Image: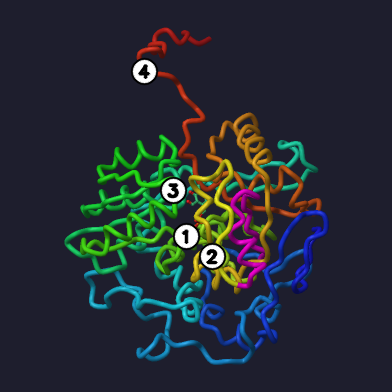
Amino acid sequence: MIWHTGHGLTVPGARGTRLPPPAGGCLAERMTTPHTTGQAPSAHREPTSTAQGPVTEERGLGPPGGSGRSLPRVSGQGPVTEERGLRPSGGSGGSLPRVSAADVGTVVTRHGIQTVEPLIRPYLRHTPAITVDRADFGLPPGPLVLKLEQLQHGGSFKARGAFANLLLRDMPAAGVVAASGGNHGAAVAFAARALGIPARIYVPHVSSPAKIARIRSYGADLVVAGDTYSDALAACQEWTAGSGALPIHAYDQAETMLGAGTLGMELAGQAPDATQVLASVGGGGLLAGVAAWYAGRVQVVGVEPEGAPTLTAAMRAGRPVDAEAGSVAVDSLAPRRVGELTFAIIRQNAAKVLLVDDEAIVATQQLLWETLRVVAEPGGCAALAALVSGRCEPAPGETVAVVISGANTTAVDFGPPAARPKPRDQGTGP
Ligand SMILES: Cc1ncc(COP(=O)(O)O)c(C=O)c1O
């Protein structure tokens, strides 16, 4: 390992930005926060140590803002308990209360994720994780676990959060509406079709044709609006105001993070020896969910493009701020700023964030295809690019897990059906 779990350190030579240290330490706070008491399902053996020794609740990754305070409350509703509100819509419990950045850490927890997981499981694929040798990617040897979430319904991890929203929140007759770079829109469209709910999706012009085609194929109303995700979000919000439809935020929503957290829960069972987990960052929902599951037990590391450094900018400013919204992964990792809620969870549970350049992302996309015949879109393999480019240098023997988060790309094009050989023309075999 080239980085350390000490507070506020910048990774030498790796252009990493450490998450700022929580003010005042937080031993007591972490010990009293409900998520620290949630038990992992028995089938999931979790790592209890890292290269630096056991990661315990006592070690440094507590909520910002001081030590030893009692749990935050949701205004006017008494203490937030993890049991509260996590019930399917239509049931007696209603949906989760709206949470603020101060409260969200009491809702997006291991226990919250465990509660949501069985609700959404019937609608999702339990995606495989493959263990390969890092040497296959031209790196020093060592175990590398790839969580192949591009095999998820809709082609990305986003289906998890989409189902969590649609199953947990009270659903108006007008259905749902979402703004998206494309993958969240595809996921919401997929989930809405599965549950018989009307859906309207806004995407920007930069959304890849593969994503737009997916959204259309799921039968949602599609609106292409503006140049960037932020433009599509603004158009979406304008329409939503008078529509009665339920907006499903791509990342800054507790249910979205809880859904993403189920990926972390699955991965923990599939890669029990992992000492660090890498996931790409756009608005921060994926990283927040995964980090909330691990809750400091392993190092959860965010990776984002240099051209869309949303989390890096937020880390430097101490709060979400606007950042450049470019890069080759513009249709997935460039929402301009991380969410208020995601940032709160990430600060509490993740270890740090790394930047990768577009060259590294594109090279990784190619390498993944050549090495494993796995297709990923740029945003889907940005986390792996941190390893391939040497921004993250694990110790020999250390198990690193990386989320391959999406593959809605036209990178593999078999040509128009008419141009493809007919099955009988493809050889007769030995
Ligand atoms: C394939 C893929 N990976 C990662 C992300 C980042 O997710 P988040 O916005 O939750 O950080 C996205 C977001 O759209 C995505 O589409």
Mark 1 CB near ligand 1 (8 Å cut): yes
Residue with the mark numbered 4: 417
Discs 1, 2 touching: Cβ within 8 Å: yes
Mark found first going from the N terminus, 2 or 3:
3
Disc 1 crowd rating (10 Å Cα; few below 14, some 14-19, many 20+) is: many
Identify the secondary structure beneath mark 2: helix
**Viewer-nearest of discs 1 and 2:** 2
Identify the secondary structure beneath mark 3: loop
Residue with the mark numbered 2: 288
Separation of marks 3 and 1 at Cα, in angstroms: 17 Å
Residue 3 percent across, percent down from the top left: 79, 62
Mark found first going from the N terminus, 1 or 2:
1
Total number of numbered discs in the rendering: 4
Magenta highlight range: 297-318
Mark 3 CB near ligand 1 (8 Å cut): yes
Identify the secondary structure beneath mark 4: helix
Identify the amino acid type marked 4: Pro
